[in-house]
Image (cartoon, coloured by chain):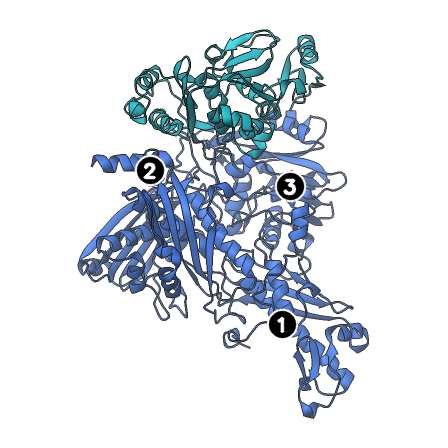
Chain colours: A cyan, B blue
């Protein structure tokens, strides 16, 4: 780890000021990616601004068919929230299968989506459920938020404050986890929403993506059989020591089919 | 006094077989236990190793001048600091701990630095300039055996061949075991099955990385604190590599966070000592997990062919195996033990097993729990399973029909004494697990396993303290609960409560030479020596009582912790307790201690049968282990908790090996998954409860009937799980690990065929 200045922000405003005043500042939420990156000297920030303790970023509320999750809310709280379980059980289920209990007690939704790891679970929820990402400056549609591997639409001095999820008619998430990290080798969120059917895939490609063929098929006929025959091309998918691109492509169809069955 | 005639297996025990709290328990759960990295000394330096990024390269030059100039750097060692030892056994170790003219694997050490802080040491490593000439490499065993493969060691010619080879080879040696006429046997068979198998290299996965603290003064007197399975071995090897008198180096074994065979050699210890000697300061070295993966000793990866023939009524007529094990960059893969154990479970007239020990550009393998046996059992027990199924016989029945028993001439030579294999098979047959119903996509697998068990050099001291309590010193590091077992055996023999005995692992200056804790030998051999040391002390205590009573020593007997007159003719004296004898020891001849030194024999072979249920997801290839039962002969379970723990631990490591774990090398010859995020060892949430059945068929070679239990438990799992998965998937899996993509591919190919 290289040396850096540590700032413990007392509010979002204070964090923004510290960020603006730093040569090369970074925000620390749950720290699951940042801390290992710092330890391996892959990052060399001038300031680490800790927003992990900010109460204004924490909390869950459900109003008028919308689930609102504060950016600093840990996965475990989303997983165990009776309100979330009732409104969008698929969201609670997804959060409950991220990493292990330690990860779920520290990792936050804001940190996860701002980092946009291609194998993270939350991007599938944000895109698959048609969520909206709220920042200190604006609202960004889930579809527009994730722009590339570890890249998002967030600009300079922009902090995610909360994510709002419209309640779908039905939805479910299925993932094939890496046996060690529990990151998604492939994770698929399917949802029948007011704005149509959504199928969002994480883990398989350089970032979360939708599968229009599956969405169209499900819009006509919401059943596992409707997607069972739809193959996704392996061309742009990830390949690593755990799974080839072809195996990932195969898993997308299997997981989508199972997610539809799970959603009922 | 022959140990063979001393068996007291029918005796009843007061404490043996009970489950008292382990003596190291509180220390370990509170964090007070001191492991390898927990020791510090004033003025201590931190040592780090520079490692090769190349799998195979000539080391043309090493320039340390820029590193040496860095403030805080106190010593740097390279190959120039280690003279090639004359002792043949040390030559490869010397070349492994520090590369000579070539680096032979990704992670091979090329230099080590000691500095006042770790940060300075890290910086110094960056300033060392190594000039490499990259050579072609080979990491696969079959590739390494091919003509034209890159040769690791110039001048290496295959030993054990019928005709003397004329060319250099990566094949170190051919081993051959067996008896009878295999060709004739196959002609007598009604059915013959021949299959090829592969297994990946796996790591022991001990949680504690290697760590040590070395201090050696200008007078040549040295101390080493280290986490190891054998500190006497560490002392002898390090003294040899550094040119020290053995008695000048005192080695103390720390608590150990797992070994499983992987801590039966040295890696950083001689480097720490060399740095300390050069800097004249203590030097601490702690490996990172990355270093543990890249530069310690995983087990071999293997390639194997097995052929077995049987008659229609289920009698095996002939069995043949060819095993090819790569053991990393130096000679010594466990292929000979694989070849010896392969068919040990069966009573065979015609059997042959051949093993090829092969070197490749990977870290030198180290022992891993029953080295060589799990892979061989995987291949053999898979073919046995397939044969039974082709013959329409129950797998257990087929094994019982052909099982080795007392008087069987084993495939590796010796004739078995009383053994428990058939008992484990029969108990498996009647076990509820064997009768439980299976669901869709589920399969059951069974397999047997054998391990020799070792005995070896052992030395124990038992000191009677003035208050009548006992300090027991053993020289075998406790990797599986042996201190509790030693305390129990001493307490049993002396007739005192368990908590009156404290067992410690003494340093190398305090006892004579002890072999490493390996080969499942410690509870057997150190236990035997403990019992004999207690008997030695009892003899002396009886002598003291005799002296007080004024009667001959042989007129005194020892019973339940008391010296008593042996009979009415001896006279009427009030029995003397151990505490009473201890309290007056200084008036009756001085301190009282019992000793025993032996190169033990008669360890007693051990067998196990495992039953596994698994479920295969036909759409993803993912395997879930649903139920697992281990049935194993312990001879006599001294502390059943620990015996069960060994049974469960072997099964769990086997599960990892069978379905997840794998050293993955890239085209560049570098290890791709040197960390627990990419190399998955099973954790509690991956596993069902592992049920255990302890069987006790006494070993005549031990006073209480003990057989080693630590290793046999990892021999059957690979095969049992492969059989289970093959039955569930409907296709024979012949390659480990059975990772989801591999299983899915096998199912797909089977469906298309």
Neighbour tally class for label 3: few under 14, some 14-19, many 20 plus, Cα within 10 Å: many
Residue A79: % across, % down = 53, 29
Horizontal side of residue A43 vs B39, given as left or right: left
Instruction: Determine the residue positioned at 45% across, 38% down.
Output: B362
Judge whether residue B225 can be spotted in this image: no
Image quarter of the N terminus of chain A: top right
Judged from the image, the secondary structure of the residue bearing numbered disc 2 is: helix
| Kind of element beneath mark 1 | helix
Q: Does the image show residue B121?
A: yes
Residue placed under numbered mark 2 in the picture: B743
* Residue that mark 1 sits on: B493
Q: Give above or below for B359 relative to A182.
A: below
Kindly report which numbered mark, 2 or 1, lies closer to the viewer in this rendering: 2
Q: Chain of mark 1?
A: B
Image-based side of A252 in relation to A168, left or right = left
When asked about the image quadrant of residue B341, the answer is bottom left
Q: Percent position (x, y) of residue B405?
A: 36, 68
In the rendered image, the residue lying farthest to the right is B587
* Percent position of residue A85, x then y: 51, 28
Side (left or right) of B711 relative to B730: right
Which residue is nearer to you in this view: A126 or A195? A195
Residue that numbered label 3 is attached to? B272
């Amino acid at each position: 780890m290289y040396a850096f200045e540590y700032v413990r922000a007392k509010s979002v405003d204070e964090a923004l000021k510290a960020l603006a005043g730093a040569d090369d500042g970074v925000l620390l939420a749950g720290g699951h990616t940042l801390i290992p990156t710092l330890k391996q000297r892959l990052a060399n920030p001038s300031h680490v601004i800790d927003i992990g303790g900010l109460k204004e970023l924490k909390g869950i509320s459900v109003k008028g068919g919308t689930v609102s999750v504060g950016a600093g809310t840990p996965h475990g709280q989303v997983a165990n929230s009776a309100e979330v379980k009732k409104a969008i059980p698929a969201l609670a289920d997804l959060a409950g299968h991220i990493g292990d209990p330690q990860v779920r007690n520290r990792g936050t939704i804001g940190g996860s989506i701002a980092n946009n790891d291609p194998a993270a679970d939350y991007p599938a929820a944000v895109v698959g459920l048609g969520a909206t990402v709220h920042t200190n400056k604006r609202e960004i549609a889930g579809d527009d938020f994730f722009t590339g591997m570890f890249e998002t639409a967030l600009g300079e001095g922009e902090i995610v404050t909360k994510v709002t999820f419209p309640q779908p008619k039905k939805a479910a998430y299925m993932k094939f986890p890496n046996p060690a990290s529990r990151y998604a080798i492939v994770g698929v969120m399917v949802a029948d929403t007011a704005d149509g059917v959504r199928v969002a895939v994480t883990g398989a490609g350089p970032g979360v993506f939708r599968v229009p063929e599956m969405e169209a098929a499900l819009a006509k006929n919401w059943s596992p059989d409707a997607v069972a025959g739809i193959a996704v091309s392996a061309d742009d998918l990830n390949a690593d020591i755990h799974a080839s691109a072809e195996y990932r492509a195969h898993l997308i169809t299997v997981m989508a089919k199972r997610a539809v069955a799970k959603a009922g | 006094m022959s140990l063979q005639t001393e068996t007291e297996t029918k005796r009843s025990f007061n404490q043996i077989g009970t489950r008292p709290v382990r003596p190291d328990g509180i220390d370990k759960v509170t964090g007070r236990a001191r492991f390898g990295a927990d020791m510090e000394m004033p003025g201590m330096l931190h040592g780090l190793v520079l490692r090769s990024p190349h799998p195979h390269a000539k080391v043309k030059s090493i320039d340390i001048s820029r590193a040496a100039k860095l403030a805080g750097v106190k010593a740097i060692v390279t190959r120039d600091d280690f003279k090639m030892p004359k002792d043949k056994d040390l030559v490869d170790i010397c070349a492994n701990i520090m590369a000579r003219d070539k680096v032979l694997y990704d992670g091979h050490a090329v230099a080590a630095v000691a500095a006042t802080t770790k940060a300075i040491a890290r910086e110094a490593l960056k300033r060392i300039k190594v000039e490499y000439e990259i050579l072609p490499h080979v990491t696969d065993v079959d590739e390494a055996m091919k003509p034209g493969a890159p040769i690791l060691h110039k001048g290496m010619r295959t030993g054990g061949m019928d005709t003397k080879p004329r060319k250099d080879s990566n094949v170190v040696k051919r081993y051959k075991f067996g008896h009878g006429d295999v060709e004739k046997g196959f002609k007598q068979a009604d059915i013959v099955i021949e299959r090829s198998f592969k297994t990946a290299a796996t790591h022991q996965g001990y949680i504690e990385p290697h760590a040590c603290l070395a201090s050696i003064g200008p007078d040549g007197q040295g101390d080493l604190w280290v986490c190891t399975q054998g500190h006497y071995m560490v002392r002898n090897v390090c003294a040899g590599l550094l040119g020290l008198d053995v008695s000048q180096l005192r080695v103390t074994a720390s608590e150990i966070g797992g070994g499983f065979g992987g801590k039966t050699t040295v890696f950083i210890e001689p480097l720490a000592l060399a740095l300390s000697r050069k800097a004249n300061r203590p030097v601490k070295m702690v490996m990172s997990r990355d270093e543990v993966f890249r530069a310690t000793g995983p087990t071999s990866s293997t390639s194997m062919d097995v052929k077995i023939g049987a008659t229609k009524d289920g009698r095996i007529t002939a069995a043949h195996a060819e095993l090819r094990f790569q053991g990393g960059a130096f000679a010594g893969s466990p292929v000979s033990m694989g070849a010896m154990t392969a068919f040990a479970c069966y009573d065979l007239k015609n059997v042959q097993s051949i093993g090829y020990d092969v070197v490749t550009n990977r870290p030198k393998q180290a022992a891993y729990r029953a080295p060589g046996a799990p892979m061989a059992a995987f291949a053999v027990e898979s073919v046995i399973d397939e044969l039974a199924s082709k013959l329409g016989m129950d797998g257990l029945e087929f094994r019982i029909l052909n099982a080795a028993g007392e008087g069987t001439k084993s495939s590796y030579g010796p004739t078995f004494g009383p053994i428990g294999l058939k008992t484990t098979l029969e108990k498996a047959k009647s076990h509820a697990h064997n009768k439980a119903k299976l669901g869709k996509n589920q399969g059951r697998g069974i397999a047997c396993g054998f391990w020799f068990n070792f005995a070896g050099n052992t030395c124990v001291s038992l000191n009677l303290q003035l208050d009548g309590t006992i300090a027991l010193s053993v020289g075998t590091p406790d990797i599986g609960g042996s201190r509790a077992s030693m305390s129990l055996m001493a307490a049993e023999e002396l007739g005192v409560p368990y908590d009156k005995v404290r067992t410690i692992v003494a340093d190398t200056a305090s006892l004579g030479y002890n072999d490493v804790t390996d080969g499942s030998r410690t509870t057997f051999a150190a236990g035997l020596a403990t019992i004999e040391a207690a008997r030695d002390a009892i003899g002396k205590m009886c002598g003291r009582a005799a002296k007080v009573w004024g009667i001959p020593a042989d007129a005194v007997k020892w019973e339940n912790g008391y010296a008593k007159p042996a009979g009415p003719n001896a006279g009427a004296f009030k029995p003397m307790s151990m505490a009473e004898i201890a309290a007056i020891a200084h008036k009756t001849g001085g301190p009282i201690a019992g000793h025993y030194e032996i190169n033990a024999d008669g360890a007693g072979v051990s067998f196990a049968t495992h039953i596994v249920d698994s479920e295969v997801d036909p759409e993803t290839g993912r395997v879930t282990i649903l139920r697992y039962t281990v049935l194993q002969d312990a001879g006599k379970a001294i502390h059943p908790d620990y015996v069960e723990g060994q049974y469960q631990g072997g099964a769990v490591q086997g599960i990892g090996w069978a379905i997840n774990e794998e050293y993955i090398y890239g085209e560049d010859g570098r290890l791709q998954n040197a960390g627990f995020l990419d190399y998955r060892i099973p954790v509690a949430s991956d596993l069902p409860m592992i049920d255990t059945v302890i069987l006790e068929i006494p070993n005549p070679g031990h006073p209480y009937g003990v057989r080693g239990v630590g290793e046999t438990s990892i021999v059957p799992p690979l095969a049992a799980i492969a059989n289970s998965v093959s039955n569930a998937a409907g296709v024979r899996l012949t390659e480990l690990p059975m990772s989801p993509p591999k299983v899915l591919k096998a199912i797909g190919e089977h469906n298309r065929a």
